[in-house]
Amino acid sequence: MLTELVALLSIGLVRGWGEVVPSWIPVIGGRRVPPMAAVVPAVVGGLLLTAISVWMALTWVGVSDGVAYENAWWQALARVCITPVALWGPIVLAPAYAYHVRRRPVSKDLATRYTQQF
């Protein structure tokens, strides 16, 4: 259940409800989401998932102790099923960075350079 919650919150980095709380939510509905309230948990979660993926890869190459399987076919099946999870950390970090870039305040220097070009 926790993974489903995290996955749903990750969608908020790329959808409109990640910028404004939906109006149907009591008390805070309709308010703007502070950018760091979304970026910090996303980056921490992405880094944690990436660390778990690295540990999993080290286990697979024999650096760390892993689970013993009954035979090689069960081990292959487990790796095929678990491998997509290894990409979840970097995939969460990418929209977290994009969310941060999209929601950060524009500096005056950058704004003046941009308007002077046109």
Image (spheres, grey):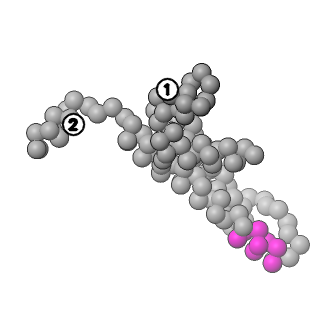
Q: Which residue is at the far top?
A: 27
> What residue is drawn where x is 42% and y is 40%?
100
**Horizontal placement of 32 versus 61: left or right?**
left
Could you say whether the residue bearing mark 1 is in a helix, strand or loop? loop
From mark 2 to mark 1, how far is it between C-alphas?
28 Å
Q: Which residue is at the far front?
A: 24
Q: Which residues are magenta?
A: 73-80
> What residue is drawn where x is 58% and y is 52%?
89
Whether residue 108 is visible? yes
Amino acid at dot 1: Arg
**Image location (x, y in percent) of residue 11:** 55, 47
Q: Which mark is residue 68?
A: none
Q: Residues within 10 Å of mark 1 (few under 14, many from 20)?
A: few
**Horizontal placement of 113 versus 37: left or right?**
left
Task: Please tell me in which quadrant of the rendered image residue 83 appears.
Answer: bottom right
Whether residue 39 is visible? no
Query: Looking at the image, which is closer to me, 9 or 60?
Result: 9
Amino acid at dot 2: Leu
Secondary structure mostly seen in magenta is helix
Q: Are marks 2 and 1 in contact (CB under 8 Å)?
A: no
Say if 62 sits above or below 37 in the image: below
Say if 83 sits above or below 106 in the image: below
- Badge 2 is on which residue? 110
Q: Residues within 10 Å of mark 2 (few under 14, many from 20)?
A: few
The mark lying in front, picked from 2 and 1, is 1
Could you say whether the residue bearing mark 2 is in a helix, strand or loop? helix
Q: Which mark is residue 31?
A: 1
**Image location (x, y in percent) of residue 78:** 76, 68
Does the magenta segment cover residue 55? Answer: no
